[in-house]
Image (cartoon, rainbow, N blue to C red):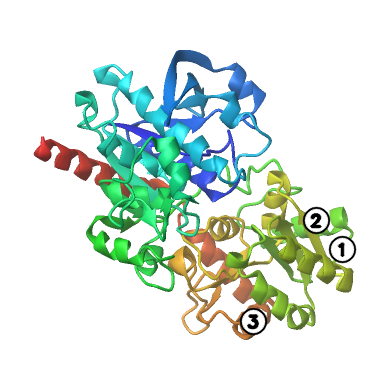
Amino acid sequence: MKVWFAASEAAPLAKSGGLADVVGSLPKALAARGIDVTVVLPKYDAIPDDIVRGAKLLRRFDVSIGWRLQYCGLMETHVDGIRYLLVDNEHYFKRGYLYGYGEEEAERYAFFSFAVLEALVRCQSEELPDILHCHDWQTGLVPLLLRTRYSHVPALRGVRTLFTIHNLGYQGVFSRGKLQDVLGAGDELFSPGGLEFYGDGSCLKAGLRYADKLTTVSPTYAREIQTPEYGEKLDGLLRERAGDLKGILNGIDLTSYDPETDPHLAVRYRDSLSRKRLNKTALQLEFGLPENEGVPLIGIVSRLVRQKGFDLIGEALPGLMAENVQLFVLGAGEPRVEAMLREAVERYSGRMRVWFGFNEGLARRVYAASDLFLMPSLFEPCGLSQLISLRYLSVPVVRETGGLKDTVQAYNEYTGTGNGFSFGPATAHDLLFTVRRALAFYRDEAVWGRIAANGAVRDYGWDSSAREYEELYQGLVREGRGMG
């Protein structure tokens, strides 16, 4: 079976968030199951030079964007045993950042979508994939174009599409005029049954409407997005397609995220809380916090946005810092959240540090140093940070939503089960109550060791999820043959 992933980012080539981790690690798990996976990615300026130097040019062709013809180079390289095809156009992708170019984003990712399909057109029949697996709004136009603009190409009629929603909150909504321009389309696509979205057009909706099957990244999130509360005004369409929608939990790369071999840690460990805590004192020393192995350190590695619960954190912070704790936050995001954290650091300078930006090595040191890992998200499609924290014996404190609800089970002192702490209502009071409950158990070394051990028992790798994707792919292929 051949599968092409079409995505806007993939670690370690280009990363802005969890999407890159998934697209970088899931193909390896699928390849281990005998599936031939190719990842198609824009050739960003951010891709490391050593990877670009190892790429070879396969072919050149023009891509039609509205009334314009744009150059496209297709380059091939291999990373961690996976084949990557890099779509080259310096006008669109030789930029300082992956995203953030306003209405230009419509043209950039329309170009990428056309380029993916033009690459397919130029494949030999034996090279064609059975499945085209598209990820998030940046590739939402691919299923639409395959079903409309490329429906006349006989070789592509057997290619089936799967569209994965990593975060419904990011929809790629652009003005109708802009999308009509870059797609070279008239009014026929801009009806409620097409791209139309409250007078504009939505690339995400294109994927939801035209892909053969849909997935999202946890079972609970698959149910949540069919409700008005979490559906981001697309819940009606998602309920309509409920029979084609499946929630498959993300995993993490257990080889990469292994505290026993992680080169970024001051002290490596596996099942030892005493060795783990040496990483806490190392982080305290590195950032000028009072060195005290016994003081609980609460860690946060996150985008600094409202979705991640920072309004709750800001409201709960006085009560939280009234406890005998230290707090370390790593991330970047909304200016108002960053301003709130800067003010908090001044107020609690002796026990709180914030590092603005993202640094992979420091993130791993925070996972290793933290006793508690805080994720009070308002919604969370899956979340990878809680899975990494469990792997590093950091006990998560989360809100019961999406993938957090699927992966973190509240500790039950009567049965000894549970791998973390959770709360339901999105209030600062419930957050603070739950953190205080966790801190009470932290003071009992034996109980805390049991909670951390409970988290280490479950396998949060990709094996079981890759099996579910394989079954979904097989079903799509069978359906395609039946249609043929």
* Residue at image point 68% right, 62% down: 300
Residue 222 makes an appearance in the image: yes
**Is the C-beta separation of discs 1 and 3 under 8 Å?**
no
Drawn side of residue 281 relative to residue 394, left or right: right
Residues 272 and 202: in front is: 202
The mark found on residue 289 in the picture is: 1
Q: Earlier in the sequence, mark 1 or mark 2?
A: 2
Q: Position of residue 49 (x, y in %)?
A: 66, 23
SS at circle 2: helix
Q: CA distance from mark 1 to mark 2?
A: 8 Å
**From the viewer's perspective, is residue 240 above or below residue 228?**
above
Task: Name the residue located 25 percent from the left edge and 46 percent from the top edge.
Answer: 212
User: Contact (CB < 8 A) between labels 1 and 2?
Assistant: yes
Nearest to N terminus: mark 2 or mark 3:
2
Give the residue type that dot 2 points to: Leu
> Can you give x and y, in whole percent of width and height, for residue 176 in the image?
43, 49
For the point 54% across and 76% down, which residue is it? 422
**In front: label 1 or label 3:** 3
Q: Amino acid at mark 1?
A: Leu
The picture places residue 19, in percent across and down from the top left corner, at 51, 47
Q: 278 or 356: nearer the eye? A: 356
Q: Residues within 10 Å of mark 1 (few under 14, many from 20)?
A: some
Looking at the rendered structure, the kind of residue marked 3 is: Ala
Residue for badge 2: 283
Image check: 44 left or right of 195? right
Percent from the top left, x then y, of residue 90?
Answer: 59, 25
Q: Which residue is mark 3?
A: 428
Mark 1 → mark 3, Cα distance in angstroms:
26 Å
Give the residue drawn at x 46%, y 63%.
403
Secondary structure under badge 3?
helix
Residue count near mark 3 (Cα–Cα under 10 Å), binned few <14, some 14–19, many ≥20? many
Q: Secondary structure at mark 1?
A: loop
